[in-house]
Image (cartoon, rainbow, N blue to C red):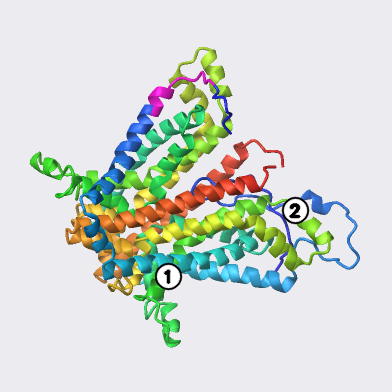
């Protein structure tokens, strides 16, 4: 095992609660390579631990991540394929499974589109202008991250349920929000609300307003300025936000579970179907659906890593 | 950084975009959350207190908060070890393990829930050897604890990682050349400068675990007073059409999460004043 010490330099920053992966290139600091007089009694690097301690720390980290993170992922695929590939494909071809996949795609399309549009609008207002209470507004946008998914569903039950504020009116006019697609979409929009705005605000703040001001002073309209100047500058960040928003939208369980009503073939999204099939001991079917969601998660992570590299390349080096 | 004198922007669209932002924010987030609090005001203080202080509610809250705290402590220690290994050492598969840290974040909670349950069930890959040792994980509070550790780990790692990367190497070199041994340098020089990030990561993991539902309910066993978490009790009360009960429990949890956000904001402000930007 080669465990030479090395130092990572990176401009990676935390992006809100969607923590950024380390996409840095491992490069020894130039400072280390310069010929530096070493203390006679300490031939070993000043900034690292003795070999055995290094080994124990690495072993602990790798073991912990393997047991708690890798194994659960492996179990999903092992269970999904435990009765062979035809059983796996058969489970996915069930009408109930197909209905859940369709519903999940529909809900994700609705909520991602709306949050994309409003995320960009919010990021424009927040990052391109100075106003009082900006930090507070960002905190409000972040709220859904700190609300339990169950509560995110509950608030819509309290608004639109039979005993809710608008329940009687909705019933009288035969409008279905709860236990139907609108309710599921609303709950999903709630939980995915911050992603796009959160990905864009720091990026757009960093880019400032000079380019836009130049475009405006040259006679471009506001929309032209946005589409020709701002959008090209933020495209990777936007994609990053949409990617995370979509992953959460497709995978959301708690909030959707509360508002869905679990009507088979009608209001079950993929995560809800995973639960139902699991509770019915249909493990192959349950894990088959779960494996699709796990693949979505893995693809999301790979694309996210690529996007973060793009974002870091596009960022102006900040002097270190 | 905003200056004391507000800079006049010549860009168009402030009124329109701000108006749309506030409208959308109100419709999706603020009005629904306000509805929750309004619903609580329909209860008298006695009723509210009666719900919250009932044995089952108190136990559910105790289980959620207690186990979340314990799991966040494990995440704090293991997260620090993982960050240290990822940032300071080179080892085969380092980049892969770095990416793996994000899996609990990306994996839908229901998938994590069924996977952890299968893994730790009596006949599972880890459940079977543990059962031989007499340890039962699935369908006990230990299962809840395990699921909470799983979902919390990325928070500590990803909060501390950028800070440890940006740490000025000269500080520890100075400490070492002034005669501090490695142990002293790590515990007296490096870890103290990581404290704000560590506490923020801890608080984020704690908050997430308190509200967590999907990855916990499968492995929990869901026995009232023993292994029933507060979010599940909300769902149960809703299914019994006891909206007032559900609302009261939700308000307690929500207030707790707001306190945690407030704390995190203060921590970040503290971190900014402590560590000068370079």
Q: Residue at x 17, y 58 (%)?
A: B241
Q: Which residues are magenta?
A: B8-18
A238 vs A80: above or below: above
Q: Is residue B220 magenta?
A: no
A7 vs A278: above or below: above
Q: Residue at x 21, y 59 (%)?
A: B47
x, y percent for residue A95: 22, 56
The answer, for residue A106, to whether it is visible in the render is no
Asked whether A265 or A216 is in front, the reply is A216
x, y percent for residue B34: 29, 44
Asked whether B144 or A10 is in front, the reply is B144
- Helix or strand or loop: what does disc 1 sit on? helix
The image quadrant of residue A111 is top left
A155 vs B218: above or below: above
The single residue placed furthest to the left in the displayed view is A172
The C terminus of chain A sits in image quarter:
top right
Q: Earlier in the sequence, mark 2 or mark 1?
A: 1
Chain containing mark 2: B
x, y percent for residue A176: 16, 44
- Helix or strand or loop: what does disc 2 sit on? helix
Per the image, the residue denoted by label 2 is B169
Per the image, the residue denoted by label 1 is B145
């Amino acid at each position: 095992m080669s465990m030479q010490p090395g130092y990572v330099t990176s401009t990676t920053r935390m992006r809100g609660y969607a923590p950024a992966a380390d996409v840095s290139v491992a490069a020894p600091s130039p400072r280390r390579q310069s010929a530096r007089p070493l203390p006679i009694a300490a031939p070993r690097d000043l900034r690292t631990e003795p070999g055995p301690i290094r080994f124990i720390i690495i072993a602990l980290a790798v073991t912990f991540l393997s047991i708690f993170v890798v194994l659960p992922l492996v179990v999903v695929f092992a269970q999904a394929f435990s009765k062979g590939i035809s059983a796996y494909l058969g489970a996915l071809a069930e009408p109930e499974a197909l209905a859940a996949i369709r519903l999940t795609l529909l809900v994700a399309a609705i909520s991602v589109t709306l949050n994309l549009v409003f995320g960009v609008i919010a990021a424009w207002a927040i990052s391109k202008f100075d106003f009082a209470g900006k930090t507070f507004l960002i905190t409000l946008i972040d709220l859904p991250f700190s609300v339990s998914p169950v509560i995110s569903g509950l608030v819509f039950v309290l608004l639109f349920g039979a005993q809710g504020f608008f329940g009687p009116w909705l019933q009288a006019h035969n409008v279905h929000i709860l236990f139907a697609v609108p309710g599921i979409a609303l709950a999903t929009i709630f939980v995915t609300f911050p992603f796009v705005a959160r990905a864009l605000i720091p990026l757009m703040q960093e880019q400032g307003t000079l380019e836009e001001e130049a475009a405006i002073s040259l006679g471009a309209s506001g929309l032209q300025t946005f589409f020709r100047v701002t959008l090209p500058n933020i495209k990777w960040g936007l994609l990053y936000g949409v990617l995370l928003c979509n992953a959460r939208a497709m995978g959301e369980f708690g909030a959707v579970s509360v508002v869905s009503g679990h009507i088979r073939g009608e209001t079950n999204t993929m995560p809800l179907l995973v639960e139902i099939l699991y509770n019915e001991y249909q493990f192959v079917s349950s894990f088959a659906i779960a494996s699709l969601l796990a693949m979505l998660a893995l693809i999301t992570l790979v694309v996210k890593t690529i996007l973060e590299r793009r974002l870091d390349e596009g960022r102006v080096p900040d002097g270190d | 950084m905003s200056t004391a004198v507000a800079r006049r922007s010549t860009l168009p669209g402030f009124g329109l975009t701000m108006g749309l932002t506030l409208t959308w924010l109100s419709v999706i987030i603020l009005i629904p959350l306000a509805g929750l609090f309004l619903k609580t005001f329909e209860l008298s203080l006695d009723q509210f207190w009666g719900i919250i202080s009932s044995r089952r509610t108190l136990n559910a809250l105790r289980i959620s908060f207690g186990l979340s705290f314990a799991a966040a402590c494990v995440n704090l220690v293991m997260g620090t070890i993982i960050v240290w290994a990822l940032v300071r050492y080179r080892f085969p598969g380092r980049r892969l393990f770095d990416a793996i840290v994000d899996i609990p974040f990306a994996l839908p909670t229901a998938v994590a829930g069924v996977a952890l349950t299968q893994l730790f069930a009596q006949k599972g890959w880890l459940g079977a050897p543990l059962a031989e040792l007499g340890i039962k994980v699935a369908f006990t509070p230990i299962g809840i604890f395990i699921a909470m550790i799983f979902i919390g780990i990325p928070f500590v790692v990803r909060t501390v990682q950028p800070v440890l990367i940006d740490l000025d190497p000269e500080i520890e070199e100075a400490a070492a050349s002034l005669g501090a041994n490695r142990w002293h340098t790590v515990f007296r020089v490096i870890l103290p400068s990581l404290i704000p990030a560590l506490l923020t990561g801890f608080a984020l993991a704690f908050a997430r675990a308190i509200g967590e539902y999907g990855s916990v309910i499968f492995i929990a066993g869901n026995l009232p007073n023993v292994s029933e978490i507060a979010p599940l009790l909300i769902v149960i009360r809703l299914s019994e059409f006891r909206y007032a009960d559900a609302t009261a429990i939700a308000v307690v949890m929500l207030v707790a999460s707001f306190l945690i956000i407030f704390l995190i904001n203060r921590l970040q402000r503290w971190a900014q004043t402590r560590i000068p930007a370079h």
